Image: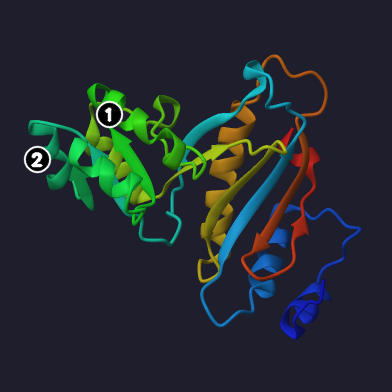
Amino acid sequence: MKRGKKYTEAAKLIDRTVQYDTTDAISMVKKAAVAKFDETIEAHIRTGCDGRHAEQQIRGAVVLPHGTGKTVRVLVFAKGDKLDEAQAAGADFVGGEELIPRIQNDGWLDFDVVVATPDMMGVVGRLGRVLGPKGLMPNPKAGTVTMDVTKAINDIKAGKIEYRLDKTNIIHVPIGKASFTEEQLADNFQTLMDAIIKARPSALKGQYLKSVVLAPTMGPGIKLNTAKFV
């Protein structure tokens, strides 16, 4: 795969044989973000879990202290006074059954997170084939199926992110933007790692964290020393 000149230059800063400590890795990942836009800094955490077994699944959410640097659009499925509550709390879109054809038939997906009250899950369930593969299906573990829509919206807007295993048992999550200070990125990253370490499945035998890599959107990845997180 041919890499661009900027990527190649950034890659020269990093020794691929070294596992860096968090402070050095964050400093380097900021330097490696050389694109013309404000790149997202992501953490890629490869686990020893086998997500095919329900008891080894990892899924949850955590509020990053400094947010993600991204404006998050929230869609809320609710009815009655919960619709008004969601609007007052700052939801970008609110509605009920009338939104189903718009999403199902028109392919409308101009939102980043979906929140639903429990009494709307029967309706939202019909969107499983559309929302599921995109990771947008509301889930009680992530706090997106709840009667407290105000708290859910406030948390999401404040920088709540969801983490879950993908098909290859890796967790991919943003921890902020390249424009963040090193301290902000370090705080966000530590908050995320604390949550993921706490989420270790009790059924898992052997190594939990196989590798932890930080990378900007368009730049090379930097490996961290996983021993620090055990």
The residue lying at 74 percent from left, 19 percent from top is 204
What's the distance in space between the residues labelled 2 and 1, CA to CA? 19 Å
The residue lying at 71 percent from left, 68 percent from top is 28
In the rendered structure, the answer to whether residue 221 lies left or right of residue 172 reads right
Label 2 sits on what residue type?
Answer: Asp
Q: Position of residue 90 (x, y in %)?
A: 20, 50
Please say whether residue 115 is visible from this viewpoint. Answer: yes
- Return the residue nearer the eye: 21 or 161: 161
Q: Which mark is residue 84?
A: 2
Q: Nearer the viewer, mark 2 or mark 1?
A: 1
Task: Tell me the SS state at disc 2.
Answer: helix
The residue lying at 42 percent from left, 54 percent from top is 67
Q: Quadrant of the C terminus?
A: top right
Query: Can you tell which quarter of the image residue 193 is in?
Result: top right
Relative to residue 202, is residue 96 depicted above or below?
A: below
First in sequence: mark 2 or mark 1? 2
Task: Tell me the SS state at disc 1.
Answer: helix
Q: Quadrant of the N terminus?
A: bottom right
Please say whether residue 144 is visible from this viewpoint. Answer: no
Q: Which mark is residue 123?
A: 1
Query: Can you tell which quarter of the image residue 121 is in?
Result: top left
Relative to residue 115, is residue 51 depicted above or below?
A: above
Query: Can you tell which quarter of the image residue 123 is in?
Result: top left
Label 1 sits on what residue type?
Answer: Val
Marks 2 & 1, CB-CB < 8 Å contact: no
- Alpha-carbon neighbours of circle 2 within 10 Å: few (<14), some, or many (≥20)? few
Residue that sits furthest to the front in the current view? 105
Q: Position of residue 211 (x, y in %)?
A: 78, 44
- Return the residue nearer the eye: 126 or 203: 126
Q: Position of residue 209 (x, y in %)?
A: 75, 35
